[in-house]
Image (cartoon, rainbow, N blue to C red):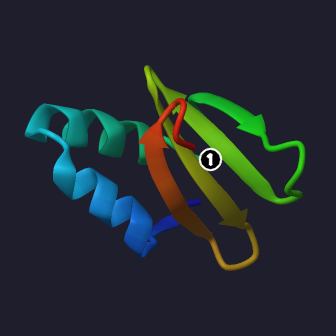
Amino acid sequence: MKYRIVYDRPAVKFLKKQSKETQTRIIRAIHKLPIEGDIKALSGNKGFFRLRIGSFRVIYSVEHDLLIIRILDIGNRGDI
């Protein structure tokens, strides 16, 4: 099954500030979701997950019935 990836505004804003190499690295890791990657469920928020990409964190949710992955925010480890 192929999931459609939807980026929220804070995620897009963060990506635009990064270098092309960093953007490519983050986007490649996101496109491997929901199966592959360093993924953990967030303990305080049911239905939300985080993906670790080096020092970056991606907060996202998955809507399995609609086949959508919503990227809520991306940031540095200490900021997310």
Q: Residue at image x 14%, y 32%? A: 21
Residue 65, by quadrant, is bottom right
Taking the image as shown, residue 35 lies to the left or right of residue 57, namely right
Q: Looking at the image, is 16 positioned above or below residue 40? A: below
Question: Residue 6: x and y, percent?
Answer: 46, 71
Q: Where residue 16 sits in the image (x, y, percent)?
A: 19, 57
Tell which residue pokes out farthest to the bottom in this image.
66
For the residue pair 32 and 12, the one nearer the viewer reads as 12
Residue located 44% across and 43% down the image: 75
Can you identify the residue that label 1 sits on? 34
Q: Which residue is most to the front?
A: 79
Which of these two is toward me, 68 or 53?
A: 53
72 over 76 or under it: above or below: below
Q: Residue furthest top?
A: 54
Q: Is residue 27 visible?
A: yes
Element at label 1: loop
Work out which quarter of the rendered image holds the N terminus and state it. bottom right
Q: Quadrant of the C terminus?
A: top right
